[in-house]
Image (spheres, rainbow, N blue to C red):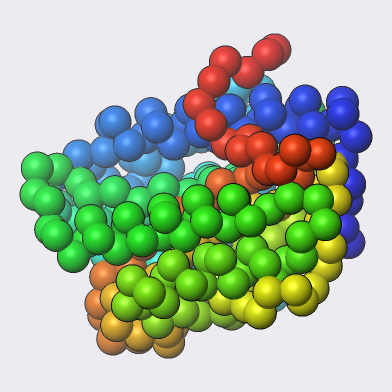
Amino acid sequence: MIEILNPTELSRARDTGAVVANILQSLKSRAAAGTNLLEIDLWTHEMIDEAGARSCYVDYEPSFGRGPFGHYICTSVNDAVLHGLPHDHVLADGDLLSLDLAVARGGVVADSAISFVVGESRPAESLAMISATERALSAGIAAARPGARIGDLSHAIGTVLSEAGYPVNTQFGGHGVGSTMHQDPHVPNAGRPGRGYVLRPGLVLALEPWVMADTAELAVDDDGWTLRSATGCRTAHSEHTIAITDDGAEILTLPGDPQR
């Protein structure tokens, strides 16, 4: 299913996007060496409730997971890159933490992810990997405009990641967003320009470049959810929800003051 949002729905999407962005920034400021991943999940639950929003994750039960997710945010540490299931784990200084959050409010979903290094340490390789995903995300957003095709966005994202020296996995990537979290079209993190679905105003997409330092192969944890690099190398993930407008792309998941 591909939804095209009307102006009223897009206004609600901006509000939902601000909720997501605000929560992620709050979590980034609070996460420190000694923080337990279950604390992060609890804080997320509290902030979602305070915003009058609804988690897209708690009851989420796709074919690639094992039963309902049962938590409010994805917490992926170091070699974990996607769908990190919160568990009893204490963060250490220098850990690379990725937080992925999707909520619904007013009947519209927004989805975003950030990666950052916990504590005072600043491992150069981790910072470079995070920077590459952020630059790739910016490139994908810059390519998003009416008349462009999904392949144009994928090519822009993949070019940045490949030029930075990272293998690119296309099994999981960006996706359409609307009244539900995961919709068509799929937006792989590499592709051929001029191919795929034609973008038009009102289309909302979540673009999410992610990489693993030295492999494109994933391994699944025993929890049935957490995806890790097959070699144990570090990983990073960045994501924004964007709306296609007459003038290009509008980033919806930026911090702001959502209207009640």
In the picture, measured across the screen, residue 182 lies left or right of residue 153, that is: right
Q: Nearer the viewer, residue 168 or 139?
A: 139
Q: Nearer the viewer, residue 13 or 156?
A: 156
Residue 128, image quadrant: bottom left
Q: Nearer the viewer, residue 175 or 221?
A: 175
In the picture, measured across the screen, residue 180 lies left or right of residue 81, that is: right
User: Residue at the location (76% across, 60% down)?
Assistant: 148
In the picture, measured across the screen, residue 136 lies left or right of residue 48, that is: left
User: Residue at the location (43% across, 42% down)?
Assistant: 41
Locate residue 10, reporting x and y percent. 79, 32
In the picture, measured across the screen, residue 208 lies left or right of residue 212, that is: right
User: Residue at the location (42% across, 70% down)?
Assistant: 161
Quadrant occupied by the N terminus: bottom right
User: Is residue 12 at all visible to an observer of this figure?
Assistant: yes
Q: How many marks?
A: 0
Locate residue 225, reporting x and y percent. 50, 70
Q: Nearer the viewer, residue 100 or 62?
A: 100
User: Is residue 34 at all visible to an observer of this figure?
Assistant: no
Quadrant occupied by the C terminus: top right
**In the rendered image of this protein, does residue 62 appear above or below residue 182?**
below
Locate residue 66, reporting x and y percent. 59, 72
Farthest residue in the top direction?
A: 260
